[in-house]
């Protein structure tokens, strides 16, 4: 999709140029068994600059429109949350890592996020300010298994005749839940998405 098409529509697929700085929320100063704080664990899980990202993804920050809000759920047992993202005018990703008090709480949080995301993202893509021309139905995506539990989906959308894929994966690892969501021109790049998740989990396990 050209920049001129995006501007003519008045709404970019990803308006990353307007992103606020990445945000993190720390509820309590909890620590892992190794002495690492829960916030440090969350920071290790979210996407980082060196994570095999496309060279065009130079705009950094968490795009907190309706799509970004789909990736976050409130739960009183959250001890840390970190958000970040990278992209350009036409593509990019959101990344949210949430740490909870216990593995059982993380399991419940995983279930809530995984259940809510397909319908939430479909509605977000169909309505203002995103206004896709057409949006398909979210379907399971063939993705490697990560962490203790993981699942991935794909949602197809069209903007000004150009096809895009929204792919997202939810991973629970110990007391943490990672949500990575991508928007890329069709046919997408599952191999890159999997590499980004793999690197995040490797960082997190390195300090375990």
Image (cartoon, rainbow, N blue to C red):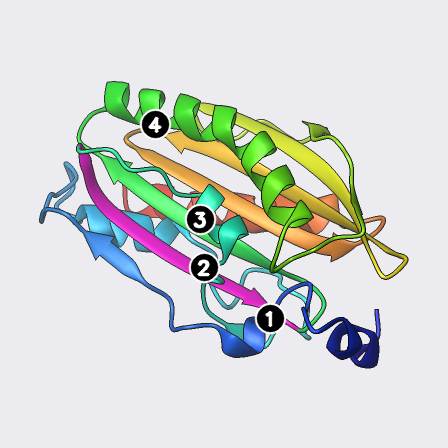
Q: Which residue is mark 2?
A: 64
Q: CA distance from mark 2 to mark 4?
A: 20 Å
Instruction: In this rendered view, identify the residue nearer to me: 62 or 48.
Output: 62
Q: Are marks 2 and 1 in contact (CB under 8 Å)?
A: no
- Mark before the other along the chain sequence, 2 or 3: 2
Residue lying farthest to the left in this orientation: 29
Location of the C terminus (image quadrant) = top left
The residue labelled by disc 1 is: 15
Question: Do callouts 2 and 3 mark residues in contact (Cβ within 8 Å)?
Answer: yes
Structural crowding at the residue carrying mark 4, measured as other residues with C-alpha within 10 Å and reported as few (<14), some (14–19) or many (≥20): many
Name the outermost residue toward the right. Answer: 161
Q: CA distance from mark 3 to mark 4?
A: 15 Å
Residue 61 inside the magenta-drawn segment: no
Q: Position of residue 146 (x, y in %)?
A: 52, 30
Q: Residue 109, labelled with which disc?
A: 4
Secondary structure of residue under mark 1: loop
Rendering quarter of residue 34 = top left
| Dot 2 crowding, Cα within 10 Å, few <14, some 14–19, many 20+ | some
- Say above or below: 149 vs 43: above
Q: CA distance from mark 3 to mark 1?
A: 15 Å
Q: Which type of secondary structure does the marked residue at label 4 adopt? A: helix
Q: Nearer the viewer, residue 10 or 54?
A: 10
Q: CA distance from mark 2 to mark 3?
A: 6 Å
Looking at the image, how many numbered discs can be counted on the residues? 4
Is 86 colored magenta in this rendering? yes
Question: Residue 123: which quarter of the image?
Answer: top right
Q: Tell me which segment is drawn in magenta.
A: 77-88
User: Sequence order check: which comes first, mark 4 or mark 1?
Assistant: 1
Q: Residue at x 55, y 37 (%)?
A: 120
Secondary-structure class at tag 2:
loop
Residue 180 tag number: none
Image x and y of residue 35, in percent: 12, 46
């Amino acid at each position: 999709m050209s920049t001129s098409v995006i501007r003519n529509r008045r709404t970019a697929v990803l308006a990353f140029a307007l992103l606020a700085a990445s945000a993190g929320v720390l509820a309590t100063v909890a620590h892992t068994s190794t002495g690492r704080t829960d916030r440090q664990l969350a920071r290790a899980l979210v996407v980082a600059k060196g994570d095999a990202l496309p060279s065009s993804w130079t705009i950094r920050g968490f795009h907190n429109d309706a799509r970004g809000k789909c990736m976050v759920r409130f739960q009183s047992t959250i001890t840390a949350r970190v958000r970040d993202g990278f992209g350009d005018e036409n593509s990019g990703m959101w990344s949210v890592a949430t740490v909870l008090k216990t593995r059982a709480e993380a399991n419940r949080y995983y279930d809530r996020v995984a259940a809510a995301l397909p319908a939430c993202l479909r509605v977000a893509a169909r309505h203002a300010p995103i206004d896709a021309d057409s949006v398909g139905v979210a379907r399971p995506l063939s993705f490697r298994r990560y962490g203790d539990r993981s699942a991935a989906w794909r949602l197809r959308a069209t903007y000004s005749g150009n096809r895009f894929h929204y792919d997202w994966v939810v991973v629970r690892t110990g007391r943490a839940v990672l949500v990575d969501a991508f928007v890329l021109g069709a046919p997408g790049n599952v191999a890159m998405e999997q590499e980004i998740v793999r690197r995040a989990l490797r960082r997190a396990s390195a300090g375990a």
